[in-house]
Image (cartoon, helix red, strand yellow):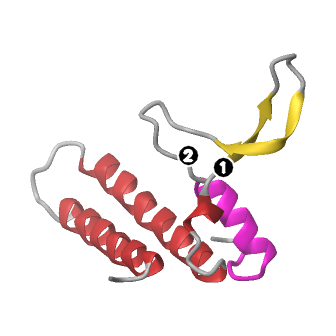
Amino acid sequence: MKARSKQLVDRAIAATVAAIEIYNKPDFQYRNETFAVLAVNGCELLFKAKWLVDHNNDIRSLYVVQPQKKKDGTLSKRAKIKGTRSGNPFTHGIEFLGKRLMEQKYLDATV
C-alpha cells in the first residue's frame, strides 16, 4: 500500500493534468473556470502531501479540531475532530497549509 502522501501526490498530478487537458480543448465552454478549479485543487493536494510528509503520514494532523462543549455550555479541555455535513473529517484548507508552509520556509511568499 502506498503512503498517504504519495497517494495525494498522485492525485495532485492527475488534477493538474486534467486541468491542462481541459484548458487545451478548443471548444469547451467554461474551460477557464474549470481549469482554475482543478489547478487549485492540485496545489492543495500537494500542500497536504507535504504536510503529511512533515508529520509522519499522520492523517489526523490534517484534521481541524475544535473544543467540545460540556452540558453546561462551557468549553471542555478535550478537542474533537470537526466534521463536514456528510460526516467526514474536515481538513485544513489551502490557506492554512500555505501559511504554515511559508512559516516553515518551504514556500516563498509569492506562491
Does residue 53 appear anywhere in the picture?
yes
The stretch in magenta equals 93-109
Q: How many marks?
A: 2
Q: Are marks 1 and 2 in contact (CB under 8 Å)?
A: yes
Q: Residue flagged by tag 2: what amino acid is it?
A: Phe
Residue 12 x, y percent position in the rendering: 38, 71
Q: Which residue is mark 2?
A: 90
- Please give the name of the residue rendered at 46% of the width and 43% of the height, measured from the top-left corner: 88
Of 41 and 25, nearer the camera is: 41
**Crowding at mark 1 (Cα within 10 Å: few <14, some 14-19, many 20+):** some
Q: Residue furthest top?
A: 72
Q: Which residue is mark 1?
A: 64
In the image, residue 108 sits, relative to residue 100, either above or below, namely below
Residue 98 x, y percent position in the rendering: 66, 65
Residue 81 x, y percent position in the rendering: 64, 45
Residue 30 x, y percent position in the rendering: 24, 43
